[in-house]
Image (cartoon, helix red, strand yellow):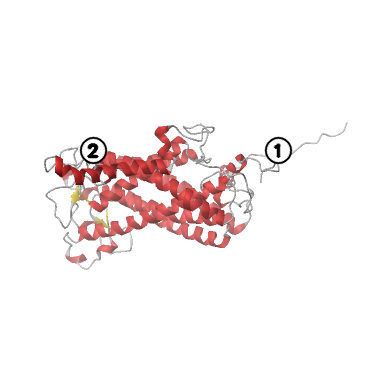
Amino acid sequence: MAPRNIQPRKWPEAFPEQLEKDPSHHLAGPFLPQTPLASTTPSRTGSPVASTGFLSASRRVPPWWLQWATNPYTALKLLITPVVLCLNWHFVTPYVAPAGIPNPFAPIFLLSGHIPDSSPEDPRYAKTYSDLVFLAYYIVFFSFVREYLAIKVARPLGRYFGLRKEAKLDRFAEQFYALVYFTFFGTWGYVSYRLLLVTNLSQASFSASCASCRPFGTRRNTFGSASPLHLSSPAHSDTLQPDYPHWDMPGELKRYYLMQFSYWCQQFIVLILGLEKPRKDYKELVAHHFVTLWLVGWSYLLNLTIIGSAVYMSMDIPDAFLALSKLLNYIQWERAKIVTFVTFIGVWTYFRHYLNLKMLWSVYSESYLVPEASHQWNWSEGVYLVWWLLPAAFLSIFALQVLNLFWYWLMWRILIRAIVTRVADDDRSDDDDDDEPPTANGKQD
């Protein structure tokens, strides 16, 4: 009796290896070896629509009430309309209506809630219901910027660098938009945050032991006082008087906060409606966006805007380096990609872990700095620090930290693999290449 050929049992790959070799993972996928440049497929017009989203894959044109999300010219019409109406009201209404009637169209795209008795040199703004309209306007605005950059800048730039596959051009455009956004808002957030600290810290009373502390080296803790978050300052948390709640915001802070909120709302819409083809870690990204919106929304409503600004800044700056390293990988600039990725890990470590852990420590240990009168839920006074709010804030930031740690662990595995093996097992960065239509010879590239 002839012996049977017994095949050795193949055990499934461990979860980390599956992620590292997953071409559709939003972090690992772009760092797998790319398909050769100059591979061509038939061109496609319009934004791709994923079958897993709200819109059907066979329906390239969304319904009329969603066309602003994929058509920059439709979005531009929506953006221009309130501006024209506002200008018309400003120049025409004084001749046909009594003076003093506020412009009803200005709050759509301009800040509302100005506090009349605030100093002209330092105007302050409060929350209003018009902020919701402001959010909606800038959701459309970011949709316009995203699609316009993709059509007019990113896709032509990708073709210039040799990208031909439609899926690669789409991914290249996504990361180009991310690079532009996070670079701009990361810089804006960092500069405005430092200026905000200087403005507020200069009005506070330093103790004699810290009279020479530099305001640029401190940050406010969750509740408004200073603590050494970045740039290494000798300042301590108890050297300034806490000033929670932060209901009267400088115009710069309110504008920055609401525009950031609009961006994350727009990104959440993109995920939910499937306006991009989802990667395999779609659920992780949705969870990340949900936690971010949860933190940002409640911090704004509950007048914890200082820590909200810190969270924004700690997320934007490292994401700019991540987008740049992905772009370099798509165009196969290998050495520049590795240098950028290593820099990105260092920046991510500082902003998304060190600073984030400092925020958690502030929530946990510095609540005693808040006046006792603020430990109540009083809508008219704008104070909401009841006993359960601090644990809720801690858990929300901790959830964000858990997601960051998961990606941080994966990033180190990618870097170590690149250093040790210099070889990846997959031959393309996106599994949506498999969805490309065949070329003229009947084969896929």
**Where is the N terminus found, in terms of image quarters?**
top right
Q: Is 4 left or right of 444, judged from the image as shown?
A: right
Front residue of 183 and 441: 441
Front residue of 324 and 368: 324
Outermost residue toward the bottom in this view = 212
One can see residue 9 in this view: yes
| Residue 106 image position (x, y, % from top left) | 23, 44
Front residue of 129 and 217: 129
Task: Assign a secondary structure to mark 1.
Answer: loop
Crowding near pointer 1: few (<14 within 10 Å), some, many (20+)?
few
Which numbered circle lies on residue 27? none
Q: Dots 2 and 1: beta carbons under 8 Å?
A: no
One can see residue 292 in this view: no
Name the residue beneath numbered marker 2: 129
Against 43, is 322 above or below? below
Against 211, is 266 above or below? above
| Residue 141 image position (x, y, % from top left) | 36, 45
Looking at the image, tell me whether mark 2 or mark 1 is earlier in sequence order: 1
| Residue 3 image position (x, y, % from top left) | 84, 34
Residue type at mark 2?
Tyr
Name the residue beneath numbered marker 1: 9
In whole angstroms, how far apart are the C-alphas of marks 2 and 1? 63 Å
Which residue corresponds to the image point at 19% horizontal and 44% vertical from the top-left?
A: 92
Front residue of 308 and 367: 308
Residue type at mark 1?
Arg
Task: Assign a secondary structure to mark 2.
Answer: loop
